Amino acid sequence: MNEKMTQMETVFNIVRIYQPIKTEMVNKIGLQNYICSADRLLRKLAEMGRIRGAKQKGDKTKTWIVAGKPEQLTLGGI
């Protein structure tokens, strides 16, 4: 099946591949894939429970990981 990936799926895959990843990096990679509202999609994915994000000490933006198995990855308060 050669369906185009939705923007939300693309943002999820960016987080999945590059986790832990900061919001500004998701935005940069998203722009290369013609996604101009990656931060909005990050919030939507977090509301759906597919990803988790938290601000690390000294950071201005969140760092994101895929919400999955607890032993998969832990990062500070995420």
Image: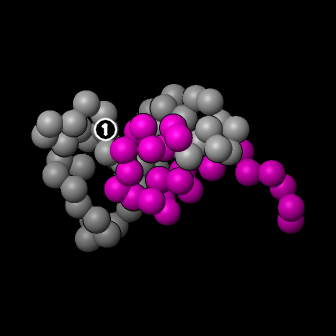
Compared with residue 68, is residue 48 higher up or lower down, i.e. above or below?
above
- Residue lying at the far right of the rendered structure: 2
Please report the residue visible at 16 percent of the width from the left and 52 percent of the height from the top. 76
Stretch of the chain drawn in magenta: 1-28
In this view, the residue in front, 18 or 28, is 28
Quadrant housing residue 66: bottom left
Disc 1 marks a residue whose amino acid type is: Lys
Q: Position of residue 11 (x, y in %)?
A: 56, 46
Q: Mark 1: which secondary structure?
A: strand
- Label 1 crowding class (10 Å Cα cut-off): few <14, some 14-19, many 20+? some
Task: Kindly tell me whether residue 44 is visible in this rendering.
Answer: no
Q: Is residue 24 magenta?
A: yes
Colour scheme in the image? one colour
Please report the residue visible at 51 percent of the width from the left and 28 percent of the height from the top. 40
Q: Position of residue 34 (x, y in %)?
A: 70, 38
Q: Is residue 27 magenta?
A: yes
Please report the residue visible at 13 percent of the width from the left and 40 percent of the height from the top. 57
Q: Position of residue 47 (x, y in %)?
A: 43, 36
Judge from the rendering whether residue 74 lies leftward or rightward of residue 45; answer left or right.
left
Please report the residue visible at 26 percent of the width from the left and 71 percent of the height from the top. 71
In this view, the residue in front, 46 or 54, is 54
In this view, the residue in front, 68 or 10, is 10
Q: Position of residue 38 (x, y in %)?
A: 54, 35
User: In the rendered view of the protein, which quadrant contains the N terminus?
Assistant: bottom right
Compared with residue 44, is residue 69 higher up or lower down, i.e. above or below?
below
Residue matched to label 1: 62
